[in-house]
Amino acid sequence: MRKAFFSLVIVAILLTACGTSATPTTVPTKPPEATKPPAPTATVTLPAVEKNLLGVELPKDAAPWAQQVDVGYGEFGPWEHWAEGIYGLGGGSAINYYTQENLLTLDSYNQLVPMMAESWEANADASVWTFHLRKGLQWSDGTPLTAKDWVYTFQYQANPENAFDFNWYYDPIKNLDKATKGEVKPEEIGVSAKDDQTLVFELKAPTPYWPALMVSAFPLPRQAVEKCGKRVWSTKPECSVSSGPYVLLTFERDKIAVCGLNKNYKGIAKPVVKYYVFKYSAQTSTDWWALYQNDEVTSINLNSLSPNVQEEVKNDPKYKDQLIINPSSDIFYITFDVTKPPFNDIRVRQAFALALNRETICNDVLKGTCAANYSFLPVGFPGWQGEKMKSIQAYDAAKAKQLMADAGYPDGKGFPEMTFYIRGDTPVPGEAVVAMWQETLGVKLSIESFDRTNFMQKMLAHQFQIYQLAYGADFPDPVNLLSLWLCSTKRHEWCNANYDELITKSATQTDAAVRGQTLFDAEKILLEDFGVIPVYSQIAYTLYKPWFHTKIVDDKRAGAKAWPGYNFFHLANQYYTVDTPKNWPPVDASYLK
């Protein structure tokens, strides 16, 4: 890394003004005194101020540059860019968020913050949205980054040959659904560039919440895709091209990934941290808690640990100042393949729902790390009305037994053998759940867990009969989560035309109360048809090393009621303080060059 040195030079300049009044009759009796020479220049050299590649100086209480390295952990995906497919991303898509930049993001209080777009506006009925990009943006290879890159991204996603699995999320775009079916060309969708800085979205109907969806949109570098191939480019440092403040330097599958600062980044998030290191760590084979205790990672999500360990840590005064508690935008749920027996019978689905004691799961099994939930919206999320929904799926063992008998399976007799599938990165107590079903319904289910990537691939191929997973909201609006159940998403097997009609209707309603009631009515259809069993909302417990600082963490340490959401703006201000252990970072130096 080159170092920039600055000196402050103070120059003292002696100015003299000389004037003589000569008269012909007066002769000076002695010559004038000689003018003194100017004093020598005084030079004061201050300590050198070192900056990183983006011109950012270290905070006064920061550790040396060599220690400004963020270290995380998790699983890798087959690719590492959002626009190539959401469910193939690894590790919570960490590499994507460091190397790519969205149009907008959310702050700690779920308020939209400009990122690549500096402003935006809608037409009168919110059916056309225009975003104005900052001038001078560049890709990491020095190529100008313009609105045309965004047009390419959405057209790429709309092309059925690319099998983008999140098109339902951007469904309001005009002709997008037709393009994904091959009925029109991708170039015919409602995304266009008026000029290099002006990106226009033409939507099928008024969509007042459209800017919030842009929090989860990242531009795709056409030059990288065409040079190295779809998806392949994003895990090869020699091919990877970034729009964000970091570039991919190293990617050794199932071992380590390293991102370094992007010298061509022209956006507004100017990070202090010089490297982001992502250590591969399969949940089934690595003790994440040991990594944190040994100062091998910056933070750890306690919810990934066993309930007993969580309880122990929360009660340990040693970790009091390291523990951050957040409400969660995650909902943990169970669903079925309703197209096949036995779950095509609503009585069976209802029985499974009523046999589940959510309070016991949260209070006794998960030791208070969650809140029992009877709504598909997380507890406290905008639009949540779980108390009104509770009567639909409240625990009722006697009724559950009767429903199973009515369906032809008294005390579980004749019920087919099957497996309860669990996504491995979600801490639902499978053993407790199947035990409740066995005790109340008399059914016996085996349990099988898959890592996130394999689970999602199998789920989207509809290979499961009954399964559990979680979903975290991408933006703070009920339609984000409720849209998962639209027939067009093909995410799950449940599909209902009346539900679809209400969700579609809500998108055009500008009166908040009217829209809220429409969404409530739609969710009620989902719950009363037992297309889903909401189990609980997670209470997020995270430990951060005391020598790690960033605004959202510091706000929470000070007691702020911040919401974690999808806030990635912390890249602009996170750093490590002088209290950082001398042996940090725990990374082979050869990776940090």
Image (cartoon, rainbow, N blue to C red):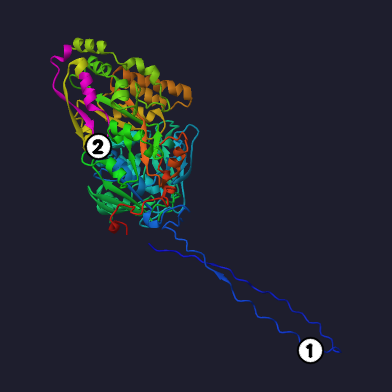
- Residue for point 20% across, 10% down: 406
Q: Number of callouts in the render?
A: 2
In the image, taking residue 448 as reference, residue 159 lies left or right, namely right
Q: Which mark is residue 65?
A: none
In the image, residue 73 lies at what x, y percent? 29, 44
Q: Is residue 429 magenta?
A: yes
- Crowd rating for badge 2 (residues with CA inside 10 Å; few <14, some 14–19, many 20+): many
Q: Residue furthest right?
A: 25
Please name the amino acid that badge 2 sits on.
Answer: Arg
Which sits in the foreground, 76 or 227?
76
In the image, taking residue 123 as reference, residue 590 lies left or right, namely left
Which sits in the foreground, 362 or 173?
362
In the image, residue 446 lies at what x, y percent? 16, 26
- Residue for point 13% across, 14% down: 413
Q: Which mark is residue 30?
A: 1
Label 2 belongs to which residue?
452
In the picture, the quarter occupied by the N terminus is bottom left
In the image, residue 437 lies at what x, y percent? 21, 19
Corner quadrant of residue 430: top left
What segment carries the magenta color? 408-437
Asked if 553 appears above or below 31 in the picture, the reply is: above
In the picture, the quarter occupied by the C terminus is bottom left
- Residue for point 48% across, 54% down: 60
Corner quadrant of residue 436: top left
Asked if 381 appears above or below 289 in the picture, the reply is: above
Please name the amino acid that badge 1 sits on.
Answer: Lys
Q: Is residue 253 visible?
A: yes
Determine the secondary structure under disc 1. loop
